[in-house]
Amino acid sequence: MPAVTVTDLKKSYGTVRAVDGLSFSVGEGEVFALLGPNGAGKSTVVEILEGHRTRDSGKVTVLGTDPGTAGQGYRDRIGIVLQEAGIERELTVREALVHYGACYSRRRPVDEVLDLVGLTGLGDRRTHQLSGGQKRRVDLALGLIGDPDVLFLDEPTTGFDPSARRHAWEMIEGLQDLGTTILLTSHYMDEVQVLADRVAVVVDGRIVAEGTPDELRGNADSETLVRFRFPEVDPNSGPVVELLGGLAGRTSLRNGVLEVYTEQPTTDLNLLTQWAIGQGGALEGLEVTTPTLEDVYLGLIGGDHGAGVEDV
Amino acid sequence: MEPGSKMSDQGRPSAVGLLFRQINYQNRLFVRTPIAAFFTLVFPLIFLILFGALFEGVDVAPGLEVDPAQFYAPGLAVFAAVSATYTNIGIGVTIYRDEGVLKRIRGTPLPRWVYMGGVVGSGVVVAAVGALIMLAVGFLLYGLEMDIGNALPAVVTFVVGVASFSLLGIALAAVAPSGQSAPALANATLLPVAFVSNVFISVRNNPPAWLDLVGDIFPLKAFADAFFSAFDPFEEASAYKPWLLLRIGVWGLFGALVAVRKFRWEPSTGAGGASGHRGRRGRG
């Protein structure tokens, strides 16, 4: 049985449809990401799953129970890491973990949790003496102290600097190894690419695409982009036309930069480099990239965003 | 899963155990907030010492021929108790809501009534400490006297009073828009009432009728009068004052009603989760 199932979930605030017929399920031990821009309805979905927000219609099940009617016994089995939940500044990290841990029936040992989130040795520090990144780790630690079966992570790295994000990712990957089911929201493509087993792209309260990060990249995956600054030669001259015609991929020349989308990067690159060397030059500013999930994502929210706005 | 084997599963913790834990936790938060401790415990003590020095040998009011300390020690004990409950709870809970602490707590298995029970329980403990300090200083330095037979009525009055003012504190937190406005709200509602409630000055001797009425409407005067009766050497009747206690209790129920209807666990938008604005608790 999946750990989380959501079927045709709807929620409006006044005339705004925050969640507009959303369905997905998360398997046990899976890391599932809701990816979308701010205001897409991700947090509303998570709050409904946590049992803190009512829904207008639809069916929601977490660990076999309906969060909307579940009591404290339900919260005993989930962990919640919110975007802006404070920590009592008067307490040390250890005191906070011991105190919050005491209300769960299962408890992870405090030192184990401190190690897991990278706060080893900081247990006796008052929480107000911690940096922003360290506080976020305490958030995560507090989400884990009750050994949850399902962990909700609402934008776990928003506001982090790049190295703090790397650390956070390592932590979350560590949780995956513990077998915790994780429902993650994010508006960072690279984050879900690294962490999530499956991703649902949410725009205007609806899922516009769903799959593994690789599936989402889909057919675009097979195309490689080769780009470089094109020498100042007449693009309509015979040798250039012959060169471009000989490439397997599609080409476009804009602002003096040639882009080649190709499924055969090796042979096309070979032709281009031979040509450049033959010219006595080089491929200036050469880049060879595969499309990222980000490209796909931006395409999805760009195209569908406009359409969605009209609906509202 | 290897780490799973290390988990201890004791079943759901008992609510009573959690309640004591919450009281303990609130007490710890209180003692680590020096400004709250100052205003609750030291501030009334300064008043007591000041009044003791200023009014030494003077009758508190015509017709109330008792030593000033006999009046001020119980009165300021009540004031300390109300500070520890109404003011501290009202401000403290609002700040924790602003900072998102309440939002976090709501996501844990801790029953909400246990959280509130911890807040009230700790308020009662701190109130008792504050009142005992006032009375102890009164006994030791200013010759405060009390008929030992009145100890139990005093305790009963005290319990009804602090329970009701705790509920009013939660009601204050329920209506206060933010942690920044909570101290102003607490002071604006408490201090003017305190001046007509036999706490700082006696209004027993033929005050203007409207002033008497204002005092009678609010619960502080009832609390101060009922508590003082246990220390009043001229009190002929029982020190149990059921009508006064009823007046206090009705306000307590009103506080509970407001709390139940209005209490929010989430910060109001704009209150912000920033941790930088906690140099507060100052009261005008």
Image (tube, coloured by chain):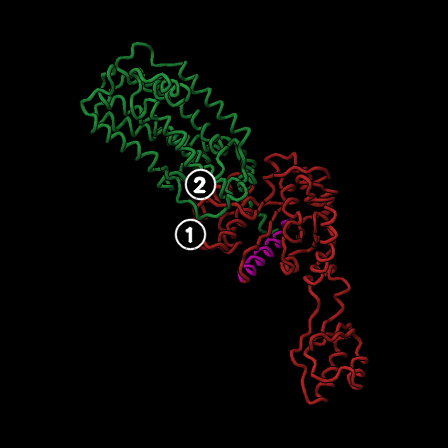
Chain colours: A red, B green
Where is A88 relative to A263, above or below?
Answer: above
Residue B180 lies, in percent from the top left, at: 44, 41
The verdict on a common chain for dots 2 and 1 is no
Q: Residue at image x 64%, y 49%? A: A39
Toward the viewer: B32 or A255?
A: A255
Please state the total of marks drawn on the protein image. Answer: 2
Q: Residues within 10 Å of mark 2 (few under 14, many from 20)?
A: some
Q: Residues within 10 Å of mark 1 (few under 14, many from 20)?
A: few
Residue topped by disc 1: A129
Spot the residue most to the left.
B57
Residue topped by disc 2: B180
Residue A66 lies, in percent from the top left, at: 68, 37
Q: Say what secondary structure mark 1 lies in.
A: helix
Name the kind of residue labelled 2 in the image: Gln
Q: Does the rendering let one see residue A104?
A: no
**Which mark identifies residue B36?**
none
User: Main SS type for the magenta part?
Assistant: helix
Toward the viewer: A149 or B142?
A: B142
Q: Quadrant of the C terminus of chain B?
A: top left
Toward the viewer: B238 or A40?
A: A40
Q: Which chain does the residue under circle 2 lie in?
A: B
Residue A259 lies, in percent from the top left, at: 72, 74
Q: Residue at image x 50%, y 50%? A: A138
Residue depth check, mark 2 versus mark 1: number of the one nearer the observer: 2
Q: Does the rendering let one see residue A202?
A: yes
Q: Is residue B23 magenta-colored?
A: no
Q: Which residues are magenta?
A: A163-181
Spatial separation of the CA atoms under disc 2 and disc 1: 22 Å
Question: Image check: B279 left or right of B55?
Answer: right
Name the kind of residue labelled 1 in the image: Gln
